[in-house]
Image (cartoon, grey):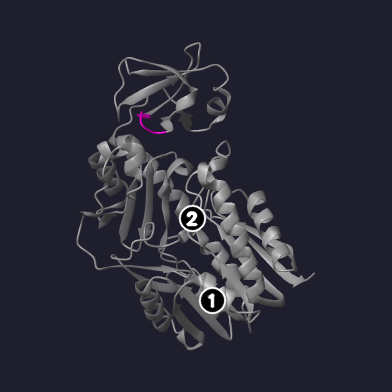
Amino acid sequence: MLPTLRLKPGHVQPIWAGHPWVYAQAVDRVEGGATRGDEVRVVDPRGNFLGRGFYSPGSAIVVRLLARDEEVPIDTDFFVKRFADAHALRASLGLGGEGDDPKTTGFRLVHAEGDGLPGIVVDRMGEALVVQLLTFGMKARERVVLDALETALGRRTILDRTPASVLKHEGFTPTPGLVRGAKLEELTFEERGFSHAIPTSLGQKTGFYFDQRELRGRVERLSRGARVLDAYAYTAAFGMAAARGGAREVVSVDESALALETAATAARANGVHASMKFVVGDARRVMQEAHGAFDLVICDPPRLAPTRTQREQALVHYARLAELACRAVRPGGLVVVCSCSAAVDLAALTRALATGALRANVSCAVLERHFQGPDHPVIAAFPEGLYLKAIIARVTPR
């Protein structure tokens, strides 16, 4: 019999409804001597079975449920089926196929809870896979996970890019780098017909922000004839979309010289470099000094609220960034303000935009709201999975 976590009264409903996380404060007691990484059963106060997952006693989330069936083994075949199902979903979305137009061979292949695999993220980058193993239980089963990936998708280069921040909560040291296949200097793939070559030394997230693919397409359609500021540009995927859309000038700003070198190389390879300018520096300073010089400002900062405890301070920063974006755009222009912090919901981001607009002495009319793309699915009972929010707003004088 597996060790069992028995929940307190009043903490069962979300999990019964499909939420995959068991919080530490919901646990009444642990029966059967569970240790870190063990497979455990989760039951309600009366002993009714709710699900199974791996135990993380040092984390605020002590179990992420993998199986709701009490009998199915969580073994290699289990992971093979989940990976195959995830791959089939992306194929049904028109991703990764030979006949794609425009072609896209870079996308999120496994989105943790959204694909029934909490603790695992996999991005496909052409013929390579980039993985993150985000719980001790998954790290302890690394060989099983990687074997299952190769069975479901074929042998290919696999890189580990698990963030070091996992160490604090899960109690293991990530081992980033090559774990299967041939060594690569670059990760090459296509997205919406753009060719990308990301150096493996460029280390943000898994190497690329696939979650913004849909919004990049929208920015492309809004950019004709515009002067565009791509703030926090990273490899300037937004900027290249704006340039292909007919922007008269695109200024992409980032603090990473390597990211912008990569961006400039990609812009030349894709034939959109003529209208693009790359600035290594502080995006906040560039926005502050713009004084209404742009028709479209894209403000997509790194995650400002990794946890809920940092939410209020993050909202102060979002409001300041919104103010700067509103000051950088001309009257009647557009701002795109994004948040990839799960702790900051759409309503909070909208309030931050309103606060920033007030400080800039302008009005913002929200025209569109965008979220992560469909290769980042969200379980209906798991609102935390909807982490990416973006607002497109028109800025006018008050």
Of the residues tagged 2 and 1, which is closer to the observer?
Answer: 1
Snapshot quadrant of residue 356: bottom right
| Image location of residue 109, percent across then percent down | 41, 52
Provide the residue span drawn in magenta. 54-59
At label 1, counting other C-alpha atoms closer than 10 Å, the crowd grade (few under 14, some 14-19, many 20 or more) is some
Q: What residue is rendered at 31% in x and 53% in y?
A: 161
Q: What amino acid type is highlighted by mark number 2?
A: Arg
Q: Position of residue 21 (x, y in %)?
A: 47, 32
Secondary structure of the residue carrying numbered label 1: helix
Prevailing secondary structure class for the magenta stretch in the rendered image? loop
Q: In this view, does 286 lie to the left or right of 157?
A: right
Give coordinates of residue 308: x percent, y percent.
Answer: 52, 42
Which quadrant holds residue 18? top right
Residue under label 2, please give it.
303
Residue at screen point 37% across, 26% down = 72
Q: From this viewpoint, which residue is outermost toward the bottom? A: 274
Q: Disc 1 residue type?
A: Val
Residue 79 versus residue 253 in the image, above or below: above
Q: Name the residue under label 1.
A: 286
**Badge number at residue 177:** none
Q: Would you say the residues marked 2 and 1 are in contact, meaning their CB atoms lie under 8 Å apart?
A: no
Instruction: Answer with left or right where residue 316 lies relative to residue 102.
Output: right
**Is residue 382 visible to the viewer in this orientation of the structure?**
yes
Alpha carbon distance from label 2 to label 1: 20 Å
**Magenta span has 55?**
yes
Can I make out residue 390 in this image? Answer: no
Q: Residue at x 47, y 49 (%)?
A: 89
Up-down: is 7 above or below 150? above
The quadrant of the image that shows the N terminus is: top left
